[in-house]
Image: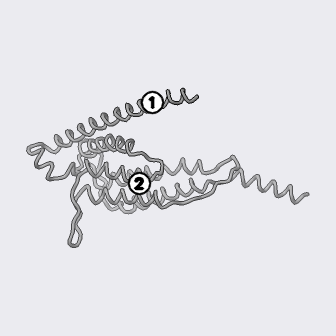
Amino acid sequence: MMTNVARGTVGSRKQVGAVSPKELGAAAILIALAVLGFALSSELPRGTLRSVGAGMLPQALSILLGLCAIPILLGARRGDGGSEEFTFSLRGPFLVLSATALFALTIKSSHFDGWSTPELGLVVAGPLAIIVGGYASPDVQLRPLVTLALFLTPFSLVLFGDLLNLPIPIMPRYVQEVLLAGWSYRGALRLAAALMVGVGVLVLFTGRRASAKTSSTKTPNATAGG
């Protein structure tokens, strides 16, 4: 009897102090990536806010990535006493890493032994990376990913190219030379950002209209069936 009571007490303590392995693993991965990113960019010049150096952005992102692990660690301890099964899938890490590599290889031309990648610029490389990385989630839909890409890419264009004065490639070089000949860098950048926002607004409202039509079509059928 005493043994059963003791076991029950120990079991309840373990349940109250249980740790979510998923959240603990996610926090560990974020911290490892933050440390790795900061270490790899530590030798790059940081510069100032007026004159941004090559190391400021990756170091700032590494710090933010590490800070994101704090609320995950705080939420890793569960007090409900429930058990959680830890499962691991290669889909998420594979697609996120593939999106990162795809972005690095396509935003600017990379040269290797005997071959090179095309320079597509942020207008193409940004949405491509967002869509590929978005499919790391099994419940993803294409339209929300496209909408996110069409709004997030112009924001990145204006932030890094216009406000921070970073010389990032905007679009494929041959397209810019043919369609935007005589335009300044900032003029081409702002035009590309405005066009992408316009297309994003169009896709957003088109999606809402389609969803409204679908819901209005299903409602009478459900009423008739009831």
The image shows residue 205 at horizontal and vertical percentages of 34, 32
Q: Judge depth for marks 2 and 1 and give the one in front.
A: 1
The residue closer to the viewer here, 173 or 31, is 173
Say above or below: 116 vs 59: below
Query: Image quarter for residue 142?
Result: top left
Task: Please indicate whether residue 10 sits to the left or right of residue 144 in the image.
Answer: right
Question: Which quarter shows the C terminus?
Answer: top right
Q: Secondary structure at mark 2?
A: helix
Residue lying farthest right? 1
Say above or below: 34 vs 222: below
Q: Determine which residue is flagged by label 2.
A: 62
The residue closer to the viewer here, 142 or 225, is 225
Residue located 44% across and 47% down the image: 140
Mark 2 residue type: Ser
Q: Determine which residue is flagged by label 1.
A: 217
Mark 1 residue type: Thr
Task: Please indicate whether residue 15 sits to the left or right of residue 90 in the image.
Answer: right
Say above or below: 8 vs 217: below
